[in-house]
Amino acid sequence: MKKMTAQEVASKIIYGELLFILDVRNEEDYAKWRIEGKRVTSVNIPYFDLLDGVEHARDQLPQDERDIVVVCAKEGSSRFVAEQLEEAGLKEVYYLEGGMKTWSETIFPVKIGDLTGGGSIYQFNRIGKGCLSYLIESQGEAVVIDAGRLTDVFEQFALEKGFTIHHVLDTHLHADHISGGRALSEKVGATYYLPPRDAEEVTYSYEPLLEGETIQVGQARIRIQSLYSPGHTIGSTSFIVDDQYLLSGDILFVDSIGRPDLAGKAEDWVRDLRETLYERYSALSSELIVLPAHYSKISEMGDEGRVFAKLGELYQSNAGLQVANQEVFRKMVTDNLPPQPHAYQEVRQTNMGKMTPSAEEQREMEMGPNRCAVHDSSESRRK
């Protein structure tokens, strides 16, 4: 019986290898959230339809030498089905170790580029959730931005590369996943920063991120400049790094824009969102490389799993930046809000420090896709 780890599956997707997924969860769970990739073929045949044998499913499976990975929620059902497929004569059959529970937590770090004064910026792609975190380093010092709950990956990466994490920043108070920013800062002895307008209800100490504040990383004086950019939350703050990169948090994505409703204030915050996108961001250099905190579609992921685009290009291609009329923009945003993220109220409460769920409860709270983006569903609104 062969297994494939979630990290191995992520590597195949990121580097564009062919992969066939047989997902044996129920149809509803599969429709909401599944493993995707540009060269991934996925089929859903529920486990209970395979209990009496797998022969009837063979015509839906590849006849070539592609790897077949059987996937379920936690692992048990996929192991049983993979065993049945092996006994039926299929050779390259694996089960996903840990199931979708483990897939949700898999993080793949990739290098984005070098900095002008020395150093580099790395993107940490939590591919099963669409969450993106960043580590910026220069001369042995590092800062982590929008760290997820699984902080070991940042500690291990810094240890292997010889970096010391001095600062940890969150662009805003997250609602779709549990921030690891405060926990990471405590573990490594770093300073934790949070936008003060998002922190009015938090129960812990933090350093306020104020517009225009500059955080230095290393002796090369790599500047991380704060830019107040409300709209997703009232305190959302972007960062300009080395005059090359714009870390946009959940305000602007490669193929969409941020949603303004996760605190129940969509009608109020949509005005802030428009001002940030159409005034604050438009005044910045079009050559800045936008690095968002999330992505929704696999098409947003480029070579080697990297998610980024130049700001000027997004003003030409991103539908959320093409709406000249304010009322049309408001209607586009409020009419196209996706379902609320799973357990988002509990996630917000946890990120405020008002709840302390167990590790297993936190894992369950985060299950499912990210839902931070608004996608324009109508070409006619681009006017």
Image (cartoon, rainbow, N blue to C red):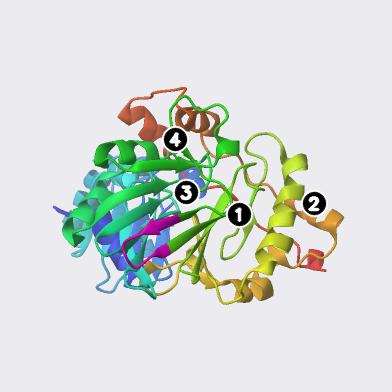
Amino acid type, residue under disc 1 in the picture: Ile
Label 1 packing within 10 angstroms: few (<14), some (14-19), many (20+): many
Front label number (1 vs 3): 1
Q: Mark 3 sits on what residue? A: 33
Label 3 packing within 10 angstroms: few (<14), some (14-19), many (20+): some
Q: Earlier in the sequence, mark 3 or mark 4?
A: 3
Front label number (3 vs 2): 2
Front label number (1 vs 4): 4
Residue 379 falls in image quadrant:
bottom right
Amino acid type, residue under disc 4 in the picture: Tyr
Amino acid type, residue under disc 3 in the picture: Trp
Q: Mark 2 sits on what residue? A: 330
**Are the two marked residues, 2 and 1, in contact with CB atoms closer than 8 angstroms?**
no
Q: Nearer the viewer, residue 159 or 331?
A: 159
Q: Position of residue 228 (x, y in %)?
A: 61, 51
Q: Is residue 318 magenta?
A: no
Front label number (4 vs 2): 4
**Are the two marked residues, 3 and 2, in contact with CB atoms closer than 8 angstroms?**
no
Q: Gap between marks 1 and 4, in whole Å?
A: 22 Å
Q: Gap between marks 3 and 4, in whole Å?
A: 35 Å
Q: Position of residue 170 (x, y in %)?
A: 46, 46
In this rendering, does residue 102 appear at all?
A: yes
Q: Which element type, helix, strand or loop, lies under badge 2?
A: helix
Tally the numbered discs: 4
Q: Mark 4 sits on what residue? A: 206
Q: Gap between marks 3 and 2, in whole Å?
A: 28 Å
Amino acid type, residue under disc 2 in the picture: Arg
Q: Mark 1 sits on what residue? A: 251
Q: Which element type, helix, strand or loop, lies under badge 4?
A: loop
**Are the two marked residues, 1 and 3, in contact with CB atoms closer than 8 angstroms?**
no
Label 4 packing within 10 angstroms: few (<14), some (14-19), many (20+): some
Stretch of the chain drawn in magenta: 215-222
